[in-house]
Image: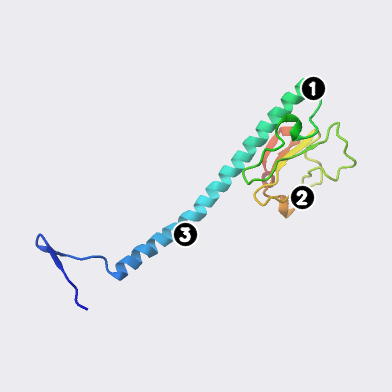
Amino acid sequence: MKRVWKVVRGRRAAGFSLVELMLAVAIAGILAAIAYPMYQGYRDHVNRTQAIADILDIENVIARYQNATDQLPDSLADIGEGGRLDPWGHPYVYLRIEGGNLKGKGKLRKDRNLVPLNTDYDLYSSGKDGVSRTPLTAKASRDDIVRANNGQFVGLATDY
């Protein structure tokens, strides 16, 4: 195959060869392979931060409701937060403990010593996987965003 060279102001100019083009595509692929996991990690961090902010916001709405009525709401719908979804598209979970109609402690969220996290109410997001179990040590609960110690801690279940 004969190459056709074009003379531009005294020097030869040609297009990219196949090897040069393949090298450029390979470099772009390597950069994308490095950048994508970093982007996913950033998105996970942003979603966790948003869930924490949402729980703190809902906690403030519950406190205002409690100050106005001298009791905790029975559900998030009572305070206008019933349809609120976490950043992963799952509804926030609320369970009234204080003054609620609970029989036993089976539904309460528990720490590694199986001690309930809260005495007033449980409020949490089931996390990225959308699955949760009552003890925080369960594999399904490790990515949950929880409220613990009656609001003294709000964050990732594995950090508690």
Seen at 35% across and 67% down, the residue is 22
Q: Nearer the viewer, residue 1 or 24?
A: 1
What quarter of the picture does the N terminus occupy?
bottom left
Asked if labels 1 and 3 touch by Cβ distance under 8 angstroms, the answer is no
Q: Nearer the viewer, residue 156 or 113?
A: 156
Horizontal side of residue 36 vs 119, given as left or right: left
Q: Which structural element holds mark 2?
A: loop
Tell me which numbered mark, 3 or 2, is placed earlier along the sequence.
Answer: 3
- Mark nearest the camera among 3 and 1 is 1
Tell me which numbered mark, 1 or 2, is placed earlier along the sequence.
Answer: 1
Real-space CA distance between mark 1 and mark 2, rounded to the nearest whole angstrom: 31 Å
Please provide percent x and percent y for residue 54.
Answer: 64, 36
The residue under label 1 is which amino acid type? Thr
Residue hosting label 3: 33
Seen at 49% across and 55% down, the residue is 36
Q: Determine crowd level at label 3: few under 14, some 14-19, many 20+ residues with C-alpha closer than 10 A.
A: few
Please provide percent x and percent y for residue 70.
Answer: 81, 22
Tell me which numbered mark, 3 or 1, is placed earlier along the sequence.
Answer: 3
Horizontal side of residue 20 vs 57, given as left or right: left
Q: Determine crowd level at label 2: few under 14, some 14-19, many 20+ residues with C-alpha closer than 10 A.
A: some
Q: Which structural element holds mark 1?
A: helix
Question: Which colour style is shown?
Answer: rainbow
Q: Quadrant of residue 147?
A: top right
Residue hosting label 1: 69
When the figure is inspected, residue 117 is found, relative to residue 41, above or below; the finding is above
The residue under label 3 is which amino acid type? Ala
Please provide percent x and percent y for residue 125.
Answer: 69, 43
Name the residue at the right extreme.
103
The residue under label 2 is which amino acid type? Arg
Instruction: Say the numbered circle drawn on residue 133.
Output: 2
